[in-house]
Amino acid sequence: MKIARYFLVGGVAAGVDFLLFVVLVKGMALGWMLAGVVSFCFATMVNYALSVRHVFISGVRFQRTQEVSLVFLVSGVGLTMNQAVLAVLIESTGWDPLLAKIGATSSVFLWNYSVRRYYIFKSRS
C-alpha cells in the first residue's frame, strides 16, 4: 500500500506546489519559470518530510545526509522534467500556466515515486 500512501503524500506536496505556483505567478507576477523552480523545491521539502513519516523508512539504505541528497538529486531530475513540460505546454501550445502546472506535476509523479521506492528507500534485503 505504499503507492496509496505516497499518492496521498504526493497529493499534499502537489497541492503545496500548485498553490505556491499560483501565488507566485498570479499574486506576485513572477515569471512561470522561476515560480516553477521555487514552488517545486518547496514542495520537495514537504514531500520528503511527509514521505519519511508516512510512507518510507528513513535510513534503511543510506545515512540521512546521503538520503536527503539523493532525494534532492532525484527531485532535480523531476524539476527538469517539470520545467520541460511547462515550457512545451506554455510556450509551444499556449496553455494557461496554471493548467500547464497540473499537467507537469502529474507527469513527474511516477518518476519520483519509482526512484524513491525502488532505489533510495529500498530495503537492503
Image (spheres, rainbow, N blue to C red):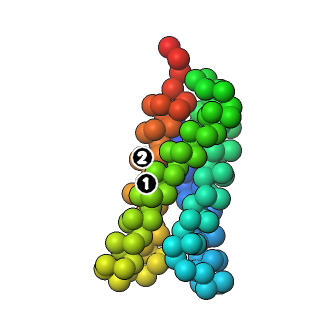
Residue 92 visible? The answer is yes
- 74 is higher (above) or lower (below) than 87: above
* 40 relative position to 112: left or right: right
Which residue does the numbered mark 1 point to in the structure image?
108
The crowd level at tag 1 (other Cα within 10 Å; few <14, some 14-19, many 20+) is some
Distance in Å between CA atoms under marks 2 and 1: 5 Å
x and y percentages locating residue 111 in the rendered image: 42, 46
- 92 is higher (above) or lower (below) than 65: below
x and y percentages locating residue 40 in the rendered image: 57, 61
Residue 103 visible? The answer is no
Which residue does the numbered mark 2 point to in the structure image?
111
x and y percentages locating residue 55 in the rendered image: 59, 36
x and y percentages locating residue 7 in the rendered image: 51, 47
Q: Amino acid at mark 1?
A: Val
Frontmost residue, 115 versus 8: 115
Q: Amino acid at mark 2?
A: Trp
- 5 is higher (above) or lower (below) than 77: above
- Determine the residue positioned at 35% across, 83% down: 94
- Determine the residue positioned at 31% across, 78% down: 92
Q: How many marks?
A: 2
- Determine the residue positioned at 61% across, 26% down: 62
- Determine the residue positioned at 51% across, 73% down: 33
Disc 2 to disc 1: CB gap under 8 Å: yes
Helix, strand or loop under label 1? helix
Residue lying furthest left: 93
Helix, strand or loop under label 2? helix
* 94 relative position to 9: left or right: left
Picture quadrant of residue 49? top right
